[in-house]
Image (tube, helix red, strand yellow):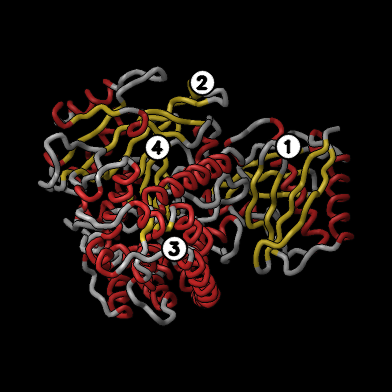
Amino acid sequence: MKAFQLKKKYIDFFVGKGHKLLPNVSLVPENDSSALFINSGMHPLVPFFMGELHPLGKKLASLQRCLRTQDIESVGDDCHNTFFEMLGNWSLGDYWKKETIELSFEFLIEELNINKDKISVTCFAGDKDAPKDEETAKIWESLGIPKSRIYFLGKKDNWWSVGETGPCGPDTEMFYDTGKKSCGPQCQPGDSCGKYIEIWNDVFMEFNRLPNSKLEKLKQRNIDTGMGVERMTAVLQGKDDIYQTELFVNLIKKIEEISGKKYEEENKKAMRIIADHIRAATFIISDGIEPSNIEHGYILRRLVRRAIRYGKLIDIKQNFIVQIAKIVIKDFGTDYLHLKENEKKVFNSLQGEENKFGKVIEEGLGKSEKVFNKKTAINHEKYSQLMQFKDKEEFFREFYKSLNKKEDLKKKFDVLVDKEEISRATVSGREAFDLYQNYGFPIEMIIDLVQEKRLLVDIEAYQKELEKHQKISQKSSLGKFKGGLKDQSGQTIKYHTTTHLLHQALRDILGSHVRQVGSNITSERLRFDFNHPEKLTDEEIKKVEDLINEKIKSNLKVEMEELSLNEAKGKGALSFFAQRYDNKVRVYSIGDFSKEVCRGPHVPFSGDIGSVKIIKEKAIGVGRRRIYAQIIEK
């Protein structure tokens, strides 16, 4: 079955079961974004898990383009992506576990014709927060899944939440048995050996985690499910990895052509990373982002430069990423028309970034030379003996593990070098990580460079530095997710209303070309992104600020009405993000000053806000500006 057939079957099935279809929208979240990119189909639905009524009803389904970078280091294996398409269905206080599992089972068995005997499932094992999910296990048994293929796992595997706080609950995951025999007798779903592939996840979202980590019951019980198109397509086609499906095969062929190498074991990781990252970058740029050193632009830059680095590892000499992007647009442009509409912008952006990064690579090579010059090379005979191991990365990892455990290296590796020689020849974990972080050199590239100098690199220490960095990044991402609509405190609601006043004030002072392109709200400040070609003058900033505070002092009434999208536009409502709700939207009016399509919530009167102070204004890319503002309490 082809990917397009899978997507059509899924949507037709759930629409036929009474679900309303959500539109496939931009990777960049709309107003009051709580993360840099849409990272799942449920991302926009958090307020509705909390009890707010969705304009399309209680039963929803979607095919949504998504981007996740928290597992970027895993890209290059058989099944991880940064950009991917996610199929999902939701119940917002409607059906519950039995109906959800029955729908999932029916779709897998009757629509996709998957052999029931190939399916295993996992359920929540229970802990101090919630009991063992025997109910879910019994439902699976009633459908013919035997106890021997039902596994109970802990929170790490079978609990899902939107962040450190907010809606959460146990889940049940469905796995397909690939039939691989290379695994041990204790292999089970959730292991990373590749025998069992996760194909679907049903989340039973019934709790809300508070800031003090305690759980409370939500006002309603919700269902949140997710099925990755790339992974499911590979399963349905019997492929060993997602890069052998039609979603990637043309990209891989192009990479083979320009590199002069085959998609074989030693080249697979690099080719997969190039294909994945340039596909992701093409979609990101088409959704309005340019490479930069902050936020969305930083993620884009990181993906592009990582692809370029891995291109060098397989000896691609010339500029090449635009050639890959052309294949992305050719293969996906029919389903995503905005790719074709923005292809010139994509090509120019990618070419410019590739040119810039060439200079960074040269700078990094200069830095690495300085690091290596401080080391003492091991003589040819001894180094040749060390380098007899085929997998150099694995060798260095095991070598330094043994060294740190003070094991006998001569006995384990049959080496002649002593510890003083090793010490003088070692590029430390910190030095290697600095080359990665500052110049983007992957560990594979560093290994190649140290080999040229007959040096060693402490990969175990490098890995610890990398893990430390990733933990900091993950905490940062979680912290970012705390903002936006999920945090519906009184203060954030005031800031939410303030963004509407700010948006209209900017249009009144600067011109009607101004439109919001993003925002983020915390309880301490608002951040508002908009398009405008030049820096605001001090006079313009003061005029915007004065106009906002004038409307606050006027204590304008804030009113909401539900209209069709055409009706909303006919009444003059700003509707830059209205595509999220198809044809039925909410329109919030602040007196006769501001009228905008939005989900809410808002204060009842503008006078409830307090005065507003603009604290900073800056550029965030070509033709884009950012304003930070704070509420000064009355």
Instruction: Give the percent coordinates (x, y) of residue 421.
Output: 36, 57
Which residue position holds label 4? 224
* Crowd around label 3: few <14 · some 14–19 · many ≥20 (10 Å): some
Query: Residue 494's mark?
Result: 1
* Closer to viewer: mark 3 or mark 1: 3
The image quarter in which residue 132 lies: top left
Residue visible at 42% across and 68% down?
Answer: 309
Inter-mark Cα distance, 3 to 2:
53 Å
Instruction: Give the percent coordinates (x, y) of residue 563.
Output: 61, 46
Residue visible at 46% across and 73% down?
Answer: 340
* Closer to viewer: mark 3 or mark 4: 3
Counting residues from the start of the chain, the first of labels 3 and 1 encountered is 3
Relative depth, front residue between 544 and 264: 264
Relative depth, front residue between 150 and 109: 150
The image quarter in which residue 189 lies: top left
Which residue position holds label 3? 375
* Closer to viewer: mark 3 or mark 2: 3
